Image (tube, rainbow, N blue to C red):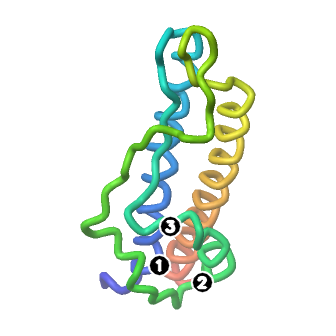
């Protein structure tokens, strides 16, 4: 029975990552006028975002990629080195942060759609094709 949900496990981890990243980026935007605030970003221990295309292209029932088991991986928050502080020592670029939020949102929605479709296929099978 647990094997039916193996394909959803990597997507759960990815959804959690994108949710955490959205919250952190929203915090950056909220602190756009805070003197001395340094923009932060988040990543997984073994950057899953690089494999985003792999998750999108392989979203079938037969996913058995154990590298996406979701166990023992923590998000790592770090200061974003790509931003330069202004006169008030604030290192948040509003346009850059909004672009990150938009890209992160697209990825989250794509993974959520895959999970929804997968659960729909399971529901279809459980209802004997009705």
The residue lying toward the viewer, choosing from 110 and 1, is 110
Q: How many marks?
A: 3
Q: Residue at x 64, y 52 (%)?
A: 109
List the single residue furthest toward the front. 87
Do the CB atoms of the residues marked 2 and 1 lie less than 8 Å apart?
A: yes
Q: Earlier in the sequence, mark 3 or mark 2?
A: 3
Question: 63 above or below 106?
Answer: below
Q: Position of residue 125 (x, y in %)?
A: 53, 82
Mark carried by residue 48? 3
- Classify residue 119 as left or right of residue 72: right
Image quadrant assignment for residue 53: bottom right
> In the image, is 130 to the left or to the right of 74?
right
Q: Circle 2 sits on which residue?
A: 60
The N terminus - image quarter: bottom left
Disc 1 marks which residue? Answer: 7
Q: CA distance from mark 2 to mark 1?
A: 7 Å
The residue shown at (64%, 38%) is 101
Where residue 52 appears, x then y in whole percent? 61, 68
The foreground one among 85 and 119 is 85
């Amino acid at each position: 029975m647990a094997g039916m949900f193996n394909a959803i496990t990597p997507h759960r981890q990815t959804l959690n990552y994108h949710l955490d990243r959205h919250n952190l980026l929203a915090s950056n935007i909220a602190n756009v006028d805070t003197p001395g605030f340094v923009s932060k970003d988040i990543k997984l221990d073994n950057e899953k975002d690089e494999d985003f295309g792999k998750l999108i292209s392989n979203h079938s029932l037969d996913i058995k990629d154990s590298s996406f088991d979701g166990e023992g991986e923590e998000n790592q928050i770090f200061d974003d080195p790509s931003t330069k502080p202004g006169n008030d020592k604030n290192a948040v670029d509003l346009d850059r942060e909004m672009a990150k939020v938009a890209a992160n949102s697209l990825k989250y929605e794509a993974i959520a759609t895959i999970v929804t479709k997968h659960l729909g296929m399971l529901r279809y099978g459980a209802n004997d094709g009705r």
